[in-house]
Image (tube, rainbow, N blue to C red):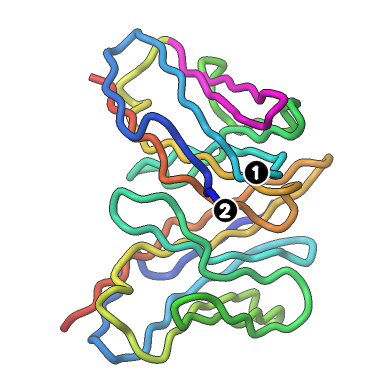
Amino acid sequence: KAGVTQTPRYLIKTRGQQVTLSCSPISGHRSVSWYQQTPGQGLQFLFEYFSETQRNKGNFPGRFSGRQFSNSRSEMNVSTLELGDSALYLCASSTTGDYGYTFGSGTRLTVV
Amino acid sequence: AQSVTQLGSHVSVSEGALVLLRCNYSSSVPPYLFWYVQYPNQGLQLLLKYTTGATLVKGINGFEAEFKKSETSFHLTKPSAHMSDAAEYFCAVLRSGAGSYQLTFGKGTKLSVIP
């Protein structure tokens, strides 16, 4: 059974650019969540999608957005990148969300 | 609001010694609790979870945790540390509301195993 797949694994962007990260959940999983991990702030919740609807959003600026497609694949987008957006972005999937999540290996974003 | 506190950002043990990583939570409702492990440059791997039922939960790689409601704790233990256990460990509580779910994580505990 394939796990959660995140692409790309590594990304280097320049301040002011925008970036799109992709996540393919485990087959049959309809809930997809995104987390940001930084040394200073730890793991912080970005948003959760279920059946193409955003159910919840964390405390992040509007530059951070996401969406989920009908096949449950999800993308997150960060516009007008700032140096502080450098982080490991983790995607996690679950059947419905209520029994925990399986995480992908993450996308390491570096903003220069 | 639900939150998680992990005591000790860094724990060192000798190979073969007991591993004890501490986690306390605050929750106004019965919590769902999780331990995840993260190896360098990797995502999070689920070690074990407590939802309902038996309070002693066994996970992968010989780890187990005990849910103690009276102490609001969910400490992670392993009887004998192995070099391959060196990693960062995260305790998390599942928050739910309005049909949505999210994990709230502790700050993490980095485990070093000394040969």
Q: Residue B10 appears in which quarter of the rendering?
A: bottom left
Principal SS element in the magenta part?
A: strand
What amino acid is labelled 2 in the image? Lys
Callout 1: SS = loop
Q: Is residue A89 above or below residue B72?
A: above
What amino acid is labelled 1 in the image? Ser
Q: Give the residue displayed 41% in from the left and 40% down from the top.
A: A106
Q: Are marks 2 and 1 in contact (CB under 8 Å)?
A: yes
B33 lies left or right of A88: right
Q: Position of residue A8 (x, y in %)?
A: 37, 29
A101 lies left or right of B63: right
Find the magenta span and give its range: A64-79
User: Circle 2 sits on which residue?
Assistant: A1
Q: Name the mark on residue A27.
A: 1
Is residue A99 in the magenta section?
A: no
Crowding at mark 2 (Cα within 10 Å: few <14, some 14-19, many 20+): few
